[in-house]
Amino acid sequence: MTMLKAPLNTSKPSPLRWFNRLYALVHLIAIFALVYRHCCNLITSPSFTTILLLVADLVLAFLWTTWQTFFMNPVHHQVFPQNLPRESEYPGLDVFVCTADPFKEPPIGVVNTVLSVLAYDYPPEKLSVYLSDDGGSQLTLFAFMEAAKFARHWLPYCRKYDIMDRSPEVYFGNDPSLLPETSDIQSKYEDMKTTIQYVMDQGSINIDQIKDARTIKALRKWTAGFTRQQHPTVIEVLLKGDEDKDVTGHCMPNLIYLAREKNKAIPHNFKAGALNALIRASTIMTNAPIFLTLDCDMFSNDPKTPSRALCHFMDSNSDPKLAFVQFPQRFHNLNQNDIYAGQHVAEIRNCTLGMDGLSGVFFMGTGGFFRRRALIEYPMKPYGLWNEQDKDGDTMALAHRVTSCSYEDNTKWGSEIGFRYGVLVEDIYTGYHLQCLGWSSVACTPTRAAFLGKVATTLNDALSQSNRWYMGMLQVGFSKFSPMTYGIRFLNPLQAMCYSHFYFRALWSFPVIIYAFLPQLALINSLPIFPKVSDPWFSLYAFLFLGSHAKDFLDHVLAGSVFKKWWNSRRMWLILGCSSYAFSILDWFLTSIGMSTCEFNVTSKVSDNELTKRYEKGIFEFGVESPLLLMVSTTTVVNLFAFLVGIKRVLTNGEKFEDMFVQLFIAGLGVIYSWPVYEGMVLRSDKGKMPSKTTLKSICLALVICFGFSSSF
Ligand SMILES: O=c1ccn([C@@H]2O[C@H](COP(=O)(O)OP(=O)(O)O[C@H]3O[C@H](CO)[C@@H](O)[C@H](O)[C@H]3O)[C@@H](O)[C@H]2O)c(=O)[nH]1
Ligand SMILES: [Mn+2]
């Protein structure tokens, strides 16, 4: 009799797929009808307005269609870590944590992320944690030397009491129940925090005050000419598994600090470059077959996460070409209704389930467990790494060599091996390339989040982040690797359409800007541009509007969201459309004609108390002067003007309400969505209000737009 082996994972298609397909079909027919109407209009009464409306609706139709591909075959995966073999059979695991700027990403936060993964429920002799410091900062190294000392107490404590929150900041912040050692460990943690905070406040380290010879030696590497953009490689092994023991005598995981060499004259390729340096250094030092990549703010929220990933990697029935297991991004600092829609609840859920039913989820930059072989196929003879015999046993010298900035010259790093270079979204781009090469991926979505990170808590940060992302997406979309020309040859066509949706999403800004200005300006000029209520075509508009909104709302609810969050996500969709996405297109254009260079601006992970309080209350944070905010405020003022003028005309000038209904509705909706912006412009006086200069500028601009364009109608 053969024993049935207990499964490590299962997958089940969602029954909702039938409903989704039916909805998509009906909606698609309505879209065709609309396009037909536009074409008729274009023939009978061609005008600038008709052309713009057609363009807007065509772009909307394209993005709607590509969005539907996520809903055609959603699949639910489940994992069963209890069925895994013994721990002694687990593969080695390397964890890569990236940080880039000690002032935007405070080291104490990074330390918490690293401690939370050092304390994983994983055989310590098989676990190594690497910290990549692109900020090349002595302060960060110092913080990690302190963290290594604290880890000797923290790890055995977590193990002994099976603590769930292994980020000490979270654990002590949650008022832990008092165990015999708790207050002792807590005071050690507070001491470490104080020490780190002290050097951060000083902004530098006074080596004379340090007694430990090893620390002094390490810190002396920051010589006079050492700057963040120009410095040699620094590698420090802070914990060495076979030598360092915790306070109970247990072996510790490895902990390695790495600041790769930087040279102003040589592009460092931002995070992708950092990750590739990590891949090479770790290949030489520990070479675990699986590695996990993490952003510095993404602390582990569940010590059993690696075993969930292993449920896919260790399953003999899984795809041998499984490249990565993605734990979708989740966040811990969201306010109640997620005012900037940073959580992307419905989006993340629908995209992961949807792509999992095709060739696999996209890589989200953090929380991905990779099979090392997917990124460097060995033996990699042509590329050099494996040719270099470690003859003198000098691993460190070799590790320094492979993290030097000239190492990648004339190699395929960044194009055919490692994380891919050249665009600002190295994450989705690398996952996409792997899938084009025949690798697959899978999402793992446990109820308790595997990792928790930080969302942007000011409007401008949220907008700049999207600006960067969607500029990066356009770089792929319009490159020779576009999913429409390249991806489609290697991927399931639906999968290629999923990627097209992301890569071209910035095009939303065309319909959003057209719909945010054109109907409003026409309203001011008493020109009806949509069918009146009694016209049969009106019901087509109503159907398309209501249908798409109802479906979107349903998708949110099914993803566990609530009405207010959905409403906020709608508002953000409009705000992004008229600001970030438009700037993404502009940035992409300027970069591609060589008038601008692309920069990865790190999102700030610090926020002062007042700001945090406002965010927690759900108040919009404007605060700074920025072109992104100016676009938003100008658009909202135009909508308000148009709405007021339109209402006045209907009430006093006897203009027909039904003729202007659609335009009034669009402007009115704009006004309702813009409420927090008006508040920020005129009703508030706190620090987070819209800067008066921006308010004034936007009113002037809006007046020019409203009355300057009158002659064109
Ligand atoms: O030159 C750089 C720039 C950034 N980073 C690190 O990259 C991570 C992400 O940077 P962040 O500013 O937090 O960007 P986000 O927009 O919040 O990140 C999202 O978008 C990025 C680009 O698409 C992905 O890399 C991230 O994983 C994803 O969370 C952070 O740990 C940084 O320290 C570097 O290591 N080197
Ligand atoms: Mn981030």
Image (cartoon, rainbow, N blue to C red):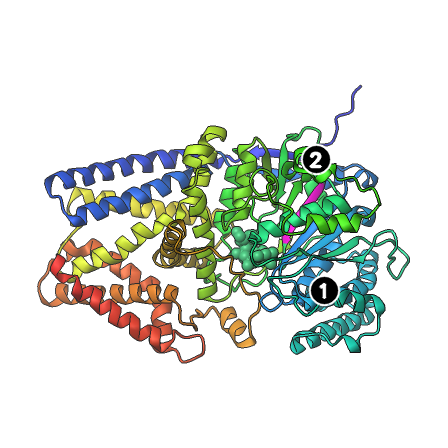
Residue 162 relative to residue 504: left or right:
right
Q: Quadrant of residue 573?
A: bottom left
Residue 536 relative to residue 31: left or right:
left
Q: Mark 1 or mark 2: which comes first in sequence?
A: 2
Using the rendered image of the protein, determine whether residue 414 is visible from the camera's viewpoint: yes
State the residue in front, 96 or 189: 96
- As measured in the structure, the alpha-carbon distance from the residue carrying label 1 to the one carrying label 2 is 40 Å
In this view, 320 is above or below 139: above
Residue 643 relative to residue 360: left or right:
left
Q: Residue furthest top?
A: 1
Which quadrant holds the N terminus?
Answer: top right
State the residue in front, 379 or 162: 379
Q: Position of residue 543 (x, y in %)?
A: 28, 44
Magenta-highlighted stretch: main secondary structure?
strand
Q: Position of residue 267 (x, y in %)?
A: 55, 53
Q: Residue furthest bottom?
A: 685
Instruction: Identify which residue is drawn at 88% across, 54% down.
Output: 243
Q: Position of residue 95 (x, y in %)?
A: 70, 50
The residue at which mark 2 appears reads as 8
Q: Position of residue 394 (x, y in %)?
A: 82, 48
The residue at which mark 1 appears reads as 141
The boundaries of the magenta stretch are: 290-294
Label 2 sits on what residue type?
A: Leu
